[in-house]
C-alpha cells in the first residue's frame, strides 16, 4: 500500500526549482541567470541518491541571485531531454548566462564541494560570502520596504545616549549572528540623530526614550512588540529565536537542537518505531500535526525535512535515514563552506532524532 504525503505543492522544493517543459525556457534561457540543471527520471536510483546533495547545493547558492539550481524530470518531459541530448540519468548541465546555447555537461564527483568548484571554475561565481552583515540602517524612507514580509528586531537610538552606546557592540554582534537568516529576520537600527528622517518612525512607535527596542512580526508595523527584557546577547538571541523560529546560538552557530520540532516528538517516536504497515496509519496524524505548524508562519525548512523523512519511511527508500546520517557526518569532516556545514548539521539533528526512535520493527 502506498501513502503519498503532499504538504506542499509548488515549483520550489527547498531551494531547488522544479521545472516542467512549459517553463524550462523561461527559467533557464530567459532569466539572465547561470543555471545548473539536473535532468532526472523518477525511477532512477542514482537520481534519488543525488537529491539530498542537490538540495544542499541549492541552499549554498540560495543567496546568490545570479545562480540557480534546478531539476527537471526529463523522462516525463522528454522533449526537453531530447533537445539537450539527455540519454542517461542523471545528466547534469551548466547553462552559463554568457553562453546559454552551449551548456557544459558535468562529469565529476557528486558532492556539494565538487559541484561548487565546477560552478566557480566555469563562471567565477562563488557562494555568497559569510562575512557578518552590518546592522541594517532604517529610516522613514526605507523601513517599510526593508521589513516587508519579514520579522524585524529594531533598536531606536540617539548618538548622545549612553545606554545606546553601551548596547551598540551587542547589537552589532546580534546582527552578525543572524546575517545568515536575513531572509527571515532583519536586525536593524534607527539612528534618530542621523541626517535621514526618522520622525514618522518615532511617532509610529511612540518613542519616549532611548534605546527603544521594537519587534515586528512579518512586516506588520502596526502591531509592534516592545522588548523589555535583558540586553545581553544570549537574551536577545533567544528572543529572536522564539519569535522568528530561527535556531541561532549566542556564538552565531546553529543551536544544538536546530531543526527539531519538539511538539511532534511523541508522534514521531510512535511512527518511527512502528512496522511498515502500521506506519501507513500513523502517518496521517503525524502529517496533520506537521501541517498545523504551517499556521505559525515559521519552521518552513523543518517542515519540509520532516515531511521528506516521513515519506521515506512510508514509501521508501526505507534505509534513507541511516545512509544519510553516514553521508552528512562524513561531509562535516571535509573542508566545505559554513553554509554547507549549517545545512548538514540542521539535517543531522533531525535525522538523528528520527533514528534514535527506530526499533526492530522499523525496517522489517
Image (cartoon, grey):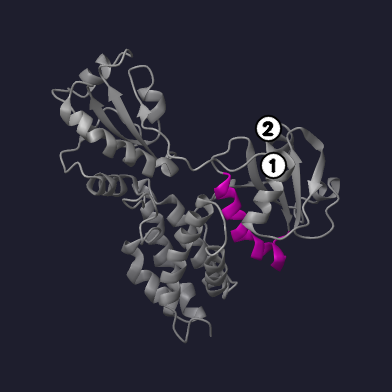
Magenta segment includes 58: yes
Instruction: Characterize the local packing of mark 2: few (<14), some (14-19) or many (20 or more) Cα atoms within 10 angstroms.
Output: few
**Residue at x-position 49% and y-position 43%:** 130
Residue underneath mark 1: 35
**Residue at x-position 77% and y-position 53%:** 106
**Residue at x-position 31% and y-position 13%:** 197
Q: On screen, 140 above or below 58?
A: above
Q: Which residues are magenta?
A: 41-61
Percent position of residue 132, x then y:
43, 39
**Image quarter for residue 123?**
top right
Residue closest to the eye, 20 or 144: 144
Residue underneath mark 2: 31
Tell me the tag on residue 176. none
Which mark is in front, 1 or 2?
A: 1
Asked whether residue 43 appears in the rendered view, the answer is no
Q: On screen, 199 above or below 170?
A: above
Amino acid at each position: 500500500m502506498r501513502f503519498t504525503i503532499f504538504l506542499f505543492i509548488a515549483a520550489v522544493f527547498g531551494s531547488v526549482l522544479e521545472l516542467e517543459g512549459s517553463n524550462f525556457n523561461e527559467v533557464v534561457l530567459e532569466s539572465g541567470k547561470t543555471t545548473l540543471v539536473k535532468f532526472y527520471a523518477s525511477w532512477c536510483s542514482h537520481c534519488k541518491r543525488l537529491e539530498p546533495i542537490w538540495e544542499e547545493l541549492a541552499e549554498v547558492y540560495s543567496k546568490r541571485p545570479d545562480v540557480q539550481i534546478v531539476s527537471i524530470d526529463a523522462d516525463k518531459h522528454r522533449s526537453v531531454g531530447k533537445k539537450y541530448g539527455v540519454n542517461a540519468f542523471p545528466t547534469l548541465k551548466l547553462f552559463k548566462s554568457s553562453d546559454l546555447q552551449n551548456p557544459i555537461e558535468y562529469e565529476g564527483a557528486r558532492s556539494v564541494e565538487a559541484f561548487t568548484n565546477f560552478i566557480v571554475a566555469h563562471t567565477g561565481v562563488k557562494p555568497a560570502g559569510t562575512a557578518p552583515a552590518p546592522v541594517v540602517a532604517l529610516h522613514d524612507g526605507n523601513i517599510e520596504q526593508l521589513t516587508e514580509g519579514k520579522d524585524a528586531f529594531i533598536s531606536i537610538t540617539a548618538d548622545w545616549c549612553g545606554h545606546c552606546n553601551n548596547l551598540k557592540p551587542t547589537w552589532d554582534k546580534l546582527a552578525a549572528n543572524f546575517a545568515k537568516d536575513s531572509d527571515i529576520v532583519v536586525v536593524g537600527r534607527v539612528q534618530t540623530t542621523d541626517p535621514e528622517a526618522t520622525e514618522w518612525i518615532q511617532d509610529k512607535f511612540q518613542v519616549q526614550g532611548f534605546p527603544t527596542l521594537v519587534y515586528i512580526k512579518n512586516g506588520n508595523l502596526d502591531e509592534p512588540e516592545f522588548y523589555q527584557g535583558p540586553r545581553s546577547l544570549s537574551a536577545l538571541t533567544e528572543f529572536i529565536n522564539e519569535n522568528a523560529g530561527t535556531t541561532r546560538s549566542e556564538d552565531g552557530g546553529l543551536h544544538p537542537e536546530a531543526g527539531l520540532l519538539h511538539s511532534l516528538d511523541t508522534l514521531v517516536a510512535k511512527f518511527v518505531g512502528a512496522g511498515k504497515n502500521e506506519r501507513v496509519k500513523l502517518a496521517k496524524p503525524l502529517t496533520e500535526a506537521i501541517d498545523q505548524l504551517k499556521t505559525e508562519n515559521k519552521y518552513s525548512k523543518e517542515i519540509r525535512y520532516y515531511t521528506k523523512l516521513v515519506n521515506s519511511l512510508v514509501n521508501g527508500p526505507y534505509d534513507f535515514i541511516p545512509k544519510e546520517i553516514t553521508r552528512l557526518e562524513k561531509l562535516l569532516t571535509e573542508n566545505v563552506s559554513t553554509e554547507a556545514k549549517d545545512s548538514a548539521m540542521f539535517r543531522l539533528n533531525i535525522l538523528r532524532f528520527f533514528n534514535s526512535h527506530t526499533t526492530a520493527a522499523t525496517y522489517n
